[in-house]
Amino acid sequence: MPFAEDAVEAPAKAQLEIFLDQHRLMLTACLDGLDEEQARRRLVPSATTLLGLVKHATFVERVWFDEAITCRSRQEIGLESGPEESFALHPGDTVASVQATHLAACAASRGATADLDLDDLVHGNRRGPLPLRWVYLHVLRELAHHCGHTDILREQLLATPAGPVPGEPAGDR
């Protein structure tokens, strides 16, 4: 994968795609080296987890590069009805399965946009027709936002030694 710094002279679409791909990979890589418990661990009051963030990023890919481009409904695609539900973890969700699903969604997104130009309109979004350029920028903003979350959560997770369970004396472990 090229680095953004190597694409300064590239066309605008290629530049945006490089930035998107870098953020996509950063998100899925937040799970690298973690066990299943770590990936599911809640470190903040909300239900946000590292595994849930990558699941949500998959939802984002499918909303913006399947629903918006193909005009298929979320039900047809097999998506949750809204973004909040996309963070929910199911018993069968594993680091490997969530990463594989995310990478497959990213590949499908690249395929869906391969023949489109930045000024081409996509028609399957509730906002109405939108230029692909706007979609790219919107998704880039979303991915950057969540990459920041993953950085902080991963730092908390890896910097926190397993301590006593709240309410349990430390000697009982």
Image: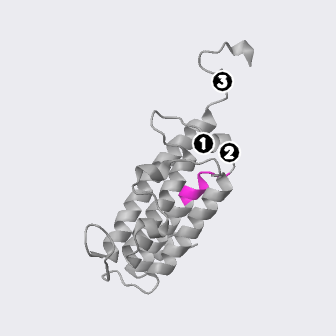
Looking at the rendered image, the disc whose residue lies closer to the viewer, 1 or 3, is: 1
Q: Which residues are magenta?
A: 26-32
What is the distance, in whole Å, between disc 1 and disc 2 at their CAs? 6 Å
Residue 73 got which mark?
A: none
Helix, strand or loop at label 3? It is loop
Q: Tell me where residue 102 sits by quadrant.
A: bottom right
Q: Tell me where residue 41 sits by quadrant.
A: top right
For this view, does 21 lie left or right of residue 168? Answer: left
Residue with the most extreme front position = 75
Helix, strand or loop at label 1? It is helix
Residue 163 got which mark?
A: 3
Question: Relative to residue 34, is residue 142 depicted above or below?
Answer: below
In the depicted view, which residue is nearer to us: 75 or 9?
Answer: 75
Amino acid under disc 3:
Gly
| Residue assigned mark 2 | 36
The answer to which of marks 1 and 3 sits earlier in the sequence is 1
The answer to which of marks 2 and 3 sits earlier in the sequence is 2
Q: Which percent across, then down, holds residue 47?
A: 48, 40
Question: Relative to residue 43, is residue 143 depicted above or below?
Answer: below
Instruction: Tell me what residue is drawn at x 49 percent, y 65 percent.
Output: 78
